[in-house]
Image: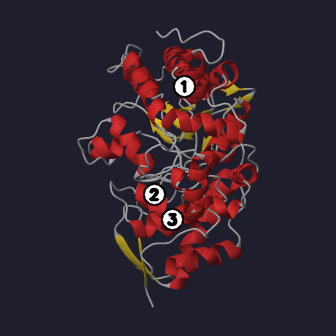
């Protein structure tokens, strides 16, 4: 008998039950080997096999095990373009956030600009503050303000700093490190400015999203920003990562004596806890050439390693292309609901 | 995709008690079990009840902490959050800012930028 499931690019694939089990095991073994963490247990794989073998279109966690959702990207899914899986609905942020609260029943929400990086948002600071302030008057659920640090925008051609991607291929390693440190300082200043101003607007927290997208230099500055926001302003900070491993584009940066390059999710969690983070969002990047079961086995292994040691809530990223979810602009509910429930039942996530 | 996650795993926000549990995770860094137990204790229900929209709809109306449907006279927005802060015994930033702005407590008003 063949079981219908999907690949990491969301295309259909049929597997036998034995092949399905092997996919989960191999995905888990891949993660365990990379991060040096335990594989999923036999019972956990049994549960996953039963979940994916069931012919139902959707799956859910056990009643009573529900968790809370935090959100990135604000209402981009409504009023943005396909880049954010958006449907270009003619709704502004005020309407969109209210819809997420009342129509969709989200547990919390993030306010951010459609151009989601901190560098462009800083020029719209007053507008952003006003939207946060106004929405605080009319909503009930927690509202965070968020953005991507996106250090890449500070390098040429988008920014003023030399691009390390141009320097490294010609062997200018010291110069590449220096420009990352200098650009990182500018990024840190922007992150702090956009976080501090939201305190008076009443924000319930700050969300740093897709952290370390440009590697360890960005992660370093976000940890510094988190330390300031959490400890100096008292605002809770959520850190959502961008990749399962921190890329060592600089290679020598340390925080609290720990080298950031090469960190896996459970190590990223610990350093974020040290920086004062309130909620940590680990990432497992979907391999589109592998099956969803393989990707989910990998993701759950990373997440379990986090939740077993976490002192703060862990909200794994389960958006497009992460957390086992296929890399496709509209991932199908048959696999999204399974990944979602698995993160709770097997990964022991505190939220998503 | 959001709807898929909501169906599969979410407490349901103000349909039930998801917003309250989320506040405990944010403000006190509580893991999910601890956060649910804390909120359940404050509401005098069980953690299982917190995800039940039937029970929570009635309870939220009784406690006047905001409900998901439009009912005239029930606390909304800032008023609901003032009551939630008291109920959960936590400080909510926008409530504190509101009190400062309206002079309900002494303290510097927002300077703005």
Q: Name the chain under label 3.
A: B
Can you say whether A79 is above or below A7 in the image? above
Same subunit, labels 2 and 1: the answer reads yes
Q: Who is closer to the viewer here, B60 or A239?
A: B60
Neighbours of disc 2 within 10 Å: few (<14), some (14-19), many (20+): some
Relative to A272, is A124 on the left or the right? left
Left or right? Give the position of A347 relative to A214: right
Which badge, 2 or 1, comes first in the chain's sequence? 1
- A286 vs A166: above or below: below
Mark 1 sits on what residue?
A: A202
Helix, strand or loop for disc 1: loop
Question: Where is A152 relative to A106, above or below?
Answer: above
User: Considering the numbered disc 2 on the image, is that residue within a helix, a strand or a loop?
Assistant: loop
SS at circle 3: helix
Instruction: Tell me which corner region of the image, top left, top right, bottom left or bottom right, holds residue B109.
Output: top right
Task: Report the residue at 47% width, 51% height from top.
Answer: B68
Residues at marks 2 and 1, CA–CA distance in whole angstroms: 40 Å
Q: Nearer the viewer, mark 3 or mark 1?
A: 1
Nearer the observer: mark 3 or 2; the answer is 3
Pointer 3 residue: B8
Residue A14 vertical position relative to residue A139 in the rendered view, above or below: below
Tell me the residue that label 2 is attached to.
Answer: A287
| Mark-to-mark CA distance, 3 and 2 | 23 Å
Chain that bears disc 2: A
Residue A206 in view, yes or no: yes
**Who is closer to the viewer here, A164 or A67?**
A67
Q: Is residue A315 left or right of residue A133?
A: right
Closer to us: A11 or A55 = A55
Same chain for mark 3 and mark 2? The answer is no
Residue at position x 42%, y 76% in the image: A57
Residue B90 falls left or right of residue A178: right
């Amino acid at each position: 008998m063949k079981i219908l499931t999907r690949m990491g690019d969301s295309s259909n694939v049929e597997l036998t039950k034995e092949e399905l089990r092997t996919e989960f095991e191999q995905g888990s073994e891949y993660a365990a080997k990379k991060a040096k963490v335990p594989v999923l247990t036999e019972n956990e794989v049994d549960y996953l096999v039963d979940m994916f073998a069931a012919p139902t279109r959707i799956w859910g966690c056990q009643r009573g095990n529900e968790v809370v959702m935090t959100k990135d990207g604000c209402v981009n899914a409504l009023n943005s373009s396909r880049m954010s899986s958006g449907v270009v609905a003619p709704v502004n942020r005020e309407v969109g956030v209210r819809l997420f609260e009342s129509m969709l029943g989200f547990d919390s929400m993030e306010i951010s600009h459609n151009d989601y990086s901190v560098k462009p948002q800083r020029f719209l600071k007053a507008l952003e503050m006003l939207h946060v302030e106004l929405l605080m008057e009319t909503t009930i659920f927690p509202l965070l303000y968020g953005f991507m640090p996106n250090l890449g925008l500070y390098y040429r051609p988008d920014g003023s700093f030399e691009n390390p991607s141009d320097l490294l291929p010609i062997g200018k390693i010291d110069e590449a490190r220096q420009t990352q440190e200098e650009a990182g300082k500018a990024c840190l200043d922007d992150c702090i400015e956009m976080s501090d101003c939201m305190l008076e607007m009443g924000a319930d927290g700050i969300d740093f999203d897709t952290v370390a997208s440009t590697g360890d230099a960005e992660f370093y500055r976000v940890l510094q920003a988190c330390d300031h926001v959490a400890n100096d302003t008292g605002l809770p900070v959520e850190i959502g990562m961008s990749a399962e491993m921190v890329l060592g584009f600089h290679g020598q940066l340390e925080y609290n004596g720990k080298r950031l390059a090469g960190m896996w999710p459970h190590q990223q969690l610990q350093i974020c806890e040290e920086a004062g983070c309130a909620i940590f969002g680990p990432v497992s990047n979907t391999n589109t050439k592998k099956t969803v079961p393989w990707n989910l086995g990998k993701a759950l292994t990373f997440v379990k390693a986090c939740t077993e040691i976490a002192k703060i809530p862990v909200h794994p990223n389960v958006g497009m292309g992460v957390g086992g979810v296929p890399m496709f602009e509209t991932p199908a509910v048959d696999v999204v609901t399974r990944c979602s429930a698995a993160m709770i039942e097997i990964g022991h996530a505190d939220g998503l | 995709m959001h709807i898929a996650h909501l169906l599969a795993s979410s407490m349901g926000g103000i349909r039930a008690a998801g917003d309250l549990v989320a506040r405990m995770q944010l403000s006190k860094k509580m893991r999910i079990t601890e956060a649910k137990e804390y909120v359940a204790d404050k509401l005098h229900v069980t953690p299982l009840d917190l995800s039940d929209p039937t029970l929570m709809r009635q309870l939220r109306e009784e406690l006047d902490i905001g409900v998901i449907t439009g009912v005239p006279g029930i606390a909304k927005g800032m008023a609901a959050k003032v009551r939630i802060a008291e109920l959960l015994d936590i400080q909510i930033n926008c409530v504190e800012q509101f009190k400062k702005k309206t002079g309900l407590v002494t303290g510097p008003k927002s300077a703005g930028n």
